[in-house]
Amino acid sequence: MTEVEIIQNVTEVEVISGGMQGPPGPIAFAIPFSRPGEQGVLDAGTPWYVEQDVTVRGIRASVKTAPAGAPIIVQVWLDSVTLVGEVEIPAGAVTSGFTPPDEAELESGGYLTVSVTSVGTTEPGADLVVAVWMEAV
């Protein structure tokens, strides 16, 4: 299975020694946003349109190459206006961990975008994937 298939087929939380790996309880789907290569600041990526009313359950950002000197900070926006949530991949780490959203309810017809507001200063980090877990309402 590809990484996208694995993310979309998640149905329950797995608790492992590193802690919670996804949102609590069952989820309907996860949308992965990916940005290959060396990271840089990005105002807003390609929009993903919401086709039905959903509740965001959480956000996780991961990279293949960890940032150094400063964290990678990622924001998820609704309609480029409302901040859904912000996650941080600390310098030397490869994931933000699961983070609940600030704004959870999204209506059909809106869209999500991902912005990168900060990257590592001595190593920006590479191959970013941001997963947004959602549940239909």
Image (tube, helix red, strand yellow):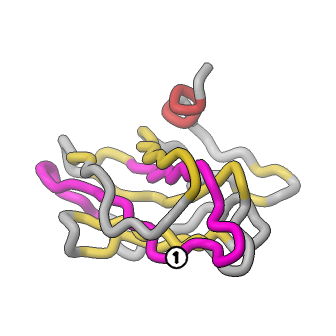
Q: Nearer the viewer, residue 103 or 82?
A: 82
User: In this rendering, is residue 81 above or below 32?
Assistant: below
Residue sitting at x 25%, y 51% = 47
Residue extending farthest top:
1
Q: Quadrant of residue 20?
A: bottom right
Q: Where does label 1 land, which residue?
A: 118
Residue drawn at x 39%, y 66% is 42
| Residue nearest the observer in this picture, 135 or 84 | 84
Which residue is rendered at x = 59% and y = 31% of the image?
A: 3
In the current view of this chain or complex, which residue is farthest to the left? 109
Is 131 a magenta residue? yes
Residue furthest front in the image = 122
Residue at the image point whose x is 21% and y is 50% from the top: 53
Image location of residue 15, percent across then percent down: 77, 51
Horizontal relation, residue 123 to residue 100: left or right:
right
Label 1 crowd bin: few (<14), some (14–19), many (20+), radius 10 Å: some
Which corner quadrant holds the N terminus? top right
Instruction: Assign the magenta stretch its main secondary structure.
Output: strand
Residue 29 located within the stretch drawn in magenta: no
Residue 78: x and y in percent read 25, 65
Amino acid at the residue labelled 1: Ser
Boundaries of the magenta span? 105-134
Residue 23 appears at what percent x and percent y? 57, 55
